Image: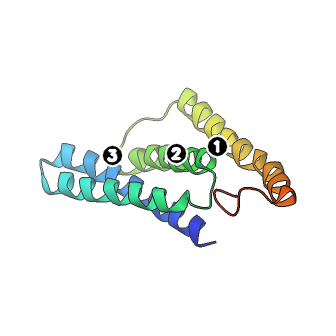
């Protein structure tokens, strides 16, 4: 459970860092770039801890996919960026892909547990 929390924190750090980059670029405040660097670094560190028990493909897909989803939504709300029908379709497809990747790892977990191989590393 803690590894999923670490992944959620990594996603939040990525979103915060990327949004602070955009904020800095539109406000001429360089402090946001420093904050961006710290948050993106923290995001990668938290992601690296989370993949100790979460499969890399699942963790990375969720980290990047959920990050893109929320960055796009916050960009529309905070920075008045436009969102087209194609963007909405793309985001919907992205979410469906994350769900498929996550649900596809359930069968592998069962096989690993039955075989007794692989220990507890990267088990979803």
Q: CA distance from mark 3 to mark 2?
A: 15 Å
Asked if the residue at tag 2 contacts the one at tag 1, i.e. Cβ–Cβ closer than 8 Å, the answer is yes
Q: Nearer the viewer, mark 1 or mark 3?
A: 1
- Distance from disc 1 to disc 3, alpha carbons, whole Å, reads 23 Å
N-terminal label among 1 and 3: 3
- Across and down, in percent, residue 119 comes to 70, 62
Q: Residue at x 47, y 65 (%)?
A: 9
Q: By what rule are the colours in the image chosen?
A: rainbow
Label of residue 79 in the image: 3
Residue shown at 32% from the left, 55% from the top: 41
* 66 to the left or right of 39: right
Picture quadrant of residue 36: bottom left
Dot 3 lies on which element? helix
Q: Is the residue marked by circle 1 packed among few (<14), some (14-19), or many (20+) residues within 10 Å?
A: some
Q: Secondary structure at mark 2?
A: helix
Residue at the (20%, 44%) spot, across then down: 26
Disc 3 vs disc 2: which is toward the camera? Answer: 2
Residue 95: which disc?
1
Query: In the rendered image, which quarter contains the N terminus?
Result: bottom right
How far apart are the alpha carbons under marks 1 and 2? 8 Å
SS state under label 1: helix
Q: Which residue is mark 2?
A: 69
Q: Residues within 10 Å of mark 2 (few under 14, many from 20)?
A: some
Task: Give coordinates of residue 93: x percent, y percent.
Answer: 65, 34
Q: Are marks 1 and 3 in contact (CB under 8 Å)?
A: no
Q: Residue furthest bottom?
A: 2
């Amino acid at each position: 459970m803690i590894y999923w929390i670490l992944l959620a924190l990594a996603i939040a750090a990525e979103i915060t860092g990327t949004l602070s980059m955009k904020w800095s670029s539109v406000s001429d405040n360089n402090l946001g770039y420093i904050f961006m660097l710290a948050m993106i670094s923290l995001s990668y560190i938290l992601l690296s801890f989370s993949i100790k028990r979460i499969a890399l493909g699942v963790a990375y897909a969720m980290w990047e996919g959920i990050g893109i989803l929320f960055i796009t939504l916050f960009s529309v709300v905070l920075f008045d960026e436009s969102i087209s029908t194609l963007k909405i379709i793309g985001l919907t497809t992205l979410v469906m892909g994350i769900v498929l990747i996550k649900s596809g790892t359930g069968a592998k977990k069962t096989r690993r547990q039955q075989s007794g191989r692989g220990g507890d590393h990267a088990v979803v």
